[in-house]
Image (cartoon, rainbow, N blue to C red):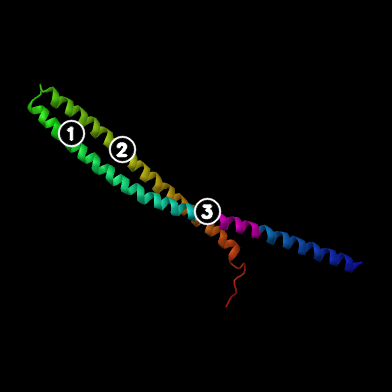
Amino acid sequence: MKRIVLLTVVLFLAFCISSTAQTQNADSLSLVSKIDEDKSKLADLQTQLEERLKLKGEAIAKAQRSANANSTAADKLSDDPKNRKLAKRADKSSSAARKDAKTARRETDRVDKLNKNIKATKKRIAKNEKRLKKYTEPKHPKAG
């Protein structure tokens, strides 16, 4: 009778340990897949950032050129304020400068948003790697 009870207890403990190990294995596999997914996303975001930085630089340069052209047109108009042709050119150049400045601000906002996403993704990767360490490190390090 004692053997049956003892055998039952041992089998129950073995079953509990086995199910705990399977749960930990599933958790660690899900963390690994999340980390890989986030690393892939990070690579994509960094590629996008390079492209956006280039576009931002171009937009800023274009906005500066438009502002300079607007300034020149305004100066010419101030020399001859009654000239309708110069007034129309000044109006068009001011509209172009306003549009280009808006585009430059949008590109700057997009770069800032990408940097924010990159930072959040790096933070999430670090957090998941830290959580994964719990599964990969030995529970009781050897003293020695």
Nearer to us in this view, 142 or 92: 92
| Residue 51 among those drawn in magenta | no
Could you tell me how far apart the alpha carbons at marks 1 and 2 are, in whole angstroms? 16 Å
Could you tell me how far apart the alpha carbons at marks 3 and 1 are, in whole angstroms? 48 Å
Q: Is residue 13 left or right of residue 125?
A: right
Mark 3 neighbour density, 10 Å: few (under 14) some (14–19) many (20 or more): few
Could you tell me how far apart the alpha carbons at marks 3 and 2 are, in whole angstroms? 32 Å
Q: Which mark is residue 11?
A: none
Relative to 62, is 16 above or below? below
Q: Earlier in the sequence, mark 3 or mark 2?
A: 3
Q: Which mark is residue 37?
A: 3
Residue at x 62%, y 69% (from the top left corner): 140
Residue type, label 1: Asn
**For the magenta stretch, what is the residue range?**
24-36
Q: Earlier in the sequence, mark 1 or mark 2?
A: 1
Residue under pointer 1: 70
Quarter of the image with the N terminus is: bottom right
Q: Which mark is residue 103?
A: 2
Residue 62 x/y as whole percent: 24, 41
Residue furthest front in the image: 85
Relative to 57, is 73 above or below? above
Q: Earlier in the sequence, mark 3 or mark 1?
A: 3
For the residue labelled by badge 3, is the local secondary structure a helix, a strand or a loop?
helix
Mark 1 neighbour density, 10 Å: few (under 14) some (14–19) many (20 or more): many
Residue 104 x/y as whole percent: 29, 40
Residue at x 35%, y 47% (from the top left corner): 52
Residue 99 x/y as whole percent: 28, 33
Residue at x 15%, y 34% (from the top left corner): 71
Nearer to us in this view, 85 or 125: 85
